[in-house]
Image (cartoon, rainbow, N blue to C red):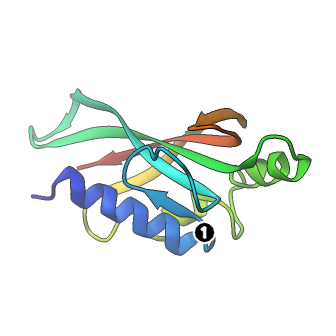
Amino acid sequence: MTTTTDVYTGLKTALENGISDLRIYPRQPDVINELPGGMLVPATANPNITFGGTTTVYTVDLIIYVASADTEEAWEKAQNYFDNAGSNSVTAAIAADSTLGGAVQGAFVRQGQTATRGVVGAGDFAVAEFTIEYVR
């Protein structure tokens, strides 16, 4: 049985391999030194959606801090993460390794929210947010 750490490692690998300039932080950093930078935030485990009593559906939120929110380029790049295909597509990165290295039975982007503003430390960033669902 895989652990949540295995799942997050698989997500990190799939995202960093699929989007070449993206760095995934293991927790919310105090300061983001490398942009774009993302973090995975546990969202839900739904025990009401089980298969055979041992498989559960989970969600995790992905927050990508793109660049300073003061530039138009940052907002354009944030929007590119929502594309279904291409070099910045979160959907394509997850689809390319939907088992996350064998850690889950399947993973996919359930929802992409609109680009918004996010603050980490003293930084104000353009942010792209996603909800990723996986079955384990």
Could you say where residue 44 lies in the image, as x and y percent from the top left?
32, 30
Q: Nearer the viewer, residue 98 or 115?
A: 115
Q: Is residue 29 visible?
A: yes
- Residue 69 location, quadrant: top right
- Residue 56 location, quadrant: top left
Q: Is residue 99 visible?
A: no
Direction top: furthest residue: 48
Mark 1 Cα within 10 Å, few/some/many (few <14, many 20+)? some
Could you say where residue 125 lies in the image, as x and y percent from the top left?
70, 41
Q: Secondary structure at mark 1?
A: loop
Residue at x 32%, y 56% (from the top left corner): 8
Q: Nearer the viewer, residue 116 or 34?
A: 34
Residue at x 56%, y 71% (from the top left corner): 18
Circle 1: residue type: Ile
Q: Nearer the viewer, residue 13 or 2?
A: 13
What residue did someone put label 1 on? 19
Could you say where residue 9 lies in the image, as x and y percent from the top left?
32, 63
Could you say where residue 112 lies in the image, as x and y percent from the top left?
62, 39
Residue at x 90%, y 46% (from the top left corner): 72
- Residue 100 location, quadrant: bottom left
Residue 103 vs 83, above or below: the answer is: below
Q: Quadrant of the N terminus?
A: bottom left
